[in-house]
Structure formats: structure tokens, C-alpha cells
Amino acid sequence: MATSHATNEATNEATNEATNEATNEVTNEATNEATNESTNEATNEATNEVPYELIYWHVIPGRGEHIRLCFVEAGVPYSDTAFTKGGMDVLHAYISESNTGDELNPPPLAPPILKHGDLVISQTPNILQYLGPKLGLAANGNDDIFRINALALTALDGFSNEVHNCHHPIAIDLYYEDQKEECLRRVKDWVKNRLPKYLGYFERVLSGKASKDGPWLYGGVLTWADLVLFQTVDGTTHFFRKAIAAARNSGKYDRVFRHYEAVKARPRISEYLASDRRQKYSNYGVYRYYEELDVVVEEKAEEKAGGKAEEKAEEKQKKKQKTRQKKRQKRN
């Protein structure tokens, strides 16, 4: 009786163990199969993705550079009319006054232009908002897209559009040489008032809770807004070398400049910046350099006087301390 009981118990135990092992094997096999299928599906989708075509000017990095940086960071291939034979013919055909578009796409006014399958869109922020989710540069997607877009638009407003207007304050169609006096007046005001305003804003963003303690602008991950801020600060640094150097040395915007260096150090970005694909700035684009416009903010007379008064007070205090020390030494 005892023998039968032991035999049944052993049999049941072996059966259960075999059943569990078989179940686990089937479950693991199904899980692996599902995982592989999901991975393969994502890989195939990326592989079968229709090509991205950037239509932009050659010679200058310009506004097209924001789009290039997104492709570079994501490691996604794209074609670029700036580097292809006949590329400028393609660009001019798109912006020609004879182009009325097609059944789906109205004609673009100006580059940058993105062609992706049947879709043809223009305007830098519009293209970036389209590419962000597709290239994995949109945090968690959904409403995050609009928060990220607001940050990108602010960087483009302050460090691109306003900077451009510093060398064309009166009219776009006038040469810089035709409005030099107005340019200098505009630059002095921009460096004094607008530069610290925008640097200060992004310093606040990077110290805010939504950035998740940095180093990125939003959600603790790199997004297209980070690439836009990097590129606009880089261009502004080329234009306003003395003013940016002073801003760095002030210590007021350390988070902004740490952010700049963090983007610059990204492996794919770093490799791209050192390559021939990264076009140099020139006096044909948004970011130019004119020595006469490379200014720093001059301190007001009262601020200088206040600074000197503080220095005198400090010196006076130091002399008093030395006198006291000498008296104590004599007593001892």
C-alpha cells in the first residue's frame, strides 16, 4: 500500500514536472517567436521605408541643417540636393513660379523642402514636426510633440530669425552694405536685450521639472528641439563671437552651454561635424560674420561707477582687517 502510494506520488510528480517543462518550452518558444516577429516587422518596415529626399541650397548649411542633423542623429539615410548632381535644377523646379504643385501638394515657396513618397512639404518647423516621431526624436509622442515643437519654434525665433534680421534689419532684398548703419544699431540692441532673454529662457527650461534634470530640453531624452537649439546656438556663436564668449564666462547660462556640448559630443553628430558633409558658414546664409558687428554690451556709466565703489569698499575693508591683525600681534 505504501509502495503504491509512493509510486503514484512519484509518477504524478514526474508528470507535473514534464508538463510544466513542456508548457514553459512552448511559452518561451511562442514568446521568442512573437518577439522575433515584432522585431523583424519593425526592421522590415524601416528597410522598406520610402526614401527621404531633402531639397535645399548648396554652399550654405542654412535652415536645411536642422533637418540634416535629425537624419544624422537617427542614423537614417537621405538624399540631399546640396550634394547631388543636378540638385540645384531640382530645387529651382520646385520653387519656380511656373510650378503649381500637383493633385496632393501645393507648390512650396522656398526651401527647405522634404519629399517622402507622395508627400511634399516645406517650412523648417513643419518638416521637423513630421520627421520627429518617425525618427524617434519625439519623446513619448502624443502631446509631447506639441511641447517639443514649441521649444524648437522658440529657438528658431530667437537664434535664427532674429539673428538673420541683424544683418538685414530693413529689407531682405537689400545688401548688407546698403543697411550697415541700421545693422549695427540692431545688433547692439539684440546683444544687450534679446540674447540674454533667449539664453535665460532655455536656462530655465533646462532647470525645470519637464526636462527631467537635463541634459535634454524635454522628457529626459534627446528630441528634435535639442538639435535645433544646438544648431541655432552654434550659428549664433559664429555670428556673435564676443557676445557668446561673454555669456559663457558669465556663468549665468551654464546649463545651456553644457547642453550644447552634450549634443556636439553625440557619436553620430560628432562624426558628421568633422566630415565634409558639414558645410561651413559663409556670408550668404543666416549666420554670417562681420567684424564690425561682433560687439559686446557696454556697461552703463552708473554700473561702472557702482562697480568701482564696491572695489574701493572692499579695499578699505581689507586695510581695516590688516590694521586689526597688526594690533593683535603687538598685544601678544
Image (spheres, grey):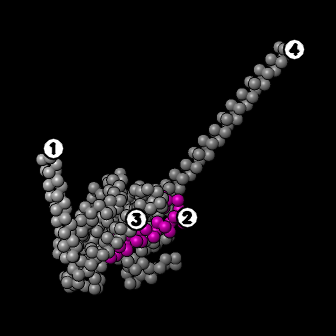
The magenta stretch is: 135-162
Q: Would you say the residues marked 1 and 2 are in contact, meaning their CB atoms lie under 8 Å apart? A: no
Q: Earlier in the sequence, mark 1 or mark 4?
A: 4
User: What is the quadrant of the C terminus in the image?
Assistant: top left
Mark 2 lies on a secondary structure that is loop
Which residue is labeled 2 in the image? 142
Residue assigned mark 4: 1
Measure how far apart labels 3 and 1 are at the Cα level: 54 Å
Q: Amino acid at mark 1?
A: Asn
Q: Residue at x 59, y 45 (%)?
A: 35
Select label 1 or label 2 by which is in front: 1
Q: Looking at the image, is mark 1 or mark 2 earlier in the sequence?
A: 2
Label 4 amino acid? Met
- Give the vertical position of 324 relative to 204 (above or below): above
Q: Residue at x 35, y 55 (%)?
A: 262
Decide whether residue 161 is among the magenta residues: yes
Label 3 CA crowd tier, 10 Å (few <14, some 14–19, many 20+): some
Q: Are marks 1 and 4 in contact (CB under 8 Å)?
A: no
Q: Which residue is mark 1?
A: 332
Q: Can residue 306 be spotted in the picture?
A: yes
Q: Residues within 10 Å of mark 1 (few under 14, many from 20)?
A: few
**Residue 227, x across and y down, in percent:** 38, 62
As rendered, which of 120 and 287 lies closer to the eye? Answer: 287
Measure the C-alpha gap from mark 4 to mark 2.
68 Å
Q: CA distance from mark 4 to mark 3?
A: 81 Å
Q: Eyeballing the image, is 140 above or below 81?
A: above
